[in-house]
Structure formats: C-alpha cells, structure tokens
Image: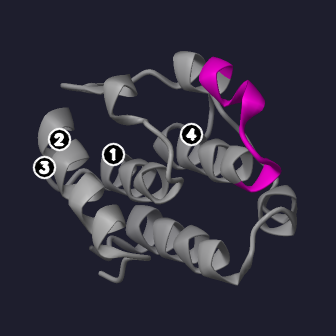
Amino acid sequence: MKFKSKAHQDLFNVLVEKAGQGGDPEYSAAIYVLSAIGKEVSKYVLSGEIKFPALFKAAEVWSSGEKALLRLAATLFNAGTWPVAVDDVFYHLDGENQLVAVRGLAIRYMGLL
C-alpha cells in the first residue's frame, strides 16, 4: 500500500492497532483516509470504534479538503450512516489527496491493503 508520507504510514499503523480490527476493510479504509488528513485524529479511534460524530464537530474549523477526506472516511466506514457524493469529495482535493481517496476506495471495495 502506498502512503503520502512516513508520518501517514506511521499513524495508519498506530490507528489500525488501536482499533483492533485486523484486516477489516471498513476500518482499514477509514483509517487509511483519516491518517492522511494531517490532523490529530487518534483520540477519536478507539478499540472497535471510530467516533465520527466527535470528529465532525472537531472538523468544523478544518479546510474543505480535510473535511472532504473526513466525509469519505466516514462513508467508507459506514455508507448507510454517512453517505457522501464522490464528486463532492474529489472537487475539494488536490492531486495527492485524490490518490488517497482512490486508494481508500480500493481498500474498502477491492480488499487491497
């Protein structure tokens, strides 16, 4: 799996272990995208839980691109609860984060880790 940076990879590894969900594609995809945002998200990832309502509240002051990645992470985790339009997400992302979004989709729906 490709990462934006070593910091992205390191945070992903920490959060996957913290969540304790192994290779679950919903958790892995959401955590992959969350860990690319570049904000403090680790306190919202717990064993067996990602606190998206609290994350959305914290994200009120984030940039539009960071919020787009958060919305994508939430829908990759649970599309029924957090639906998002793909064009809305990609509209707000630069090229590097568009690749993160595509990789997140591949993790979730193609099982690529």
Q: Secondary structure at mark 3?
A: loop
39 left or right, relative to 49: right
Residue 60, picture quadrant? top right
Residue, disc 2? 21
Is 12 rendered above or below residue 50?
Answer: below
First along the sequence among labels 3 and 4: 3
Residue 27 spot, x, y in % from top left: 33, 45
* Residue drawn at the location 28% of the way across and 73% of the way down: 6
Q: CA distance from mark 2 to mark 1?
A: 7 Å
Q: Main secondary structure of the magenta part?
A: helix
Mark 4 belongs to which amino acid? Ala
First along the sequence among labels 2 and 1: 2
Mark 1 belongs to which amino acid? Tyr
Q: CA distance from mark 1 to mark 4?
A: 10 Å
Mark 3 belongs to which amino acid? Gly
13 left or right, relative to 81: left
Residue, disc 3? 22
First along the sequence among labels 1 and 4: 1
Residue 85 spot, x, y in % from top left: 82, 53
Check contact, mark 2 vs mark 1: CB within 8 A: yes
Magenta residues (range): 57-65
First along the sequence among labels 2 and 4: 2
Q: CA distance from mark 2 to mark 3?
A: 4 Å
Is 73 rendered above or below residue 105?
Answer: above
Q: Secondary structure at mark 4?
A: helix
Q: Which mark is residue 27?
A: 1
Count neighbours of disc 3 (C-alpha within 10 A) and say few if under 14, some if 14 to 19, many if 20 or more: few
Q: Nearer the viewer, residue 64 or 82?
A: 64
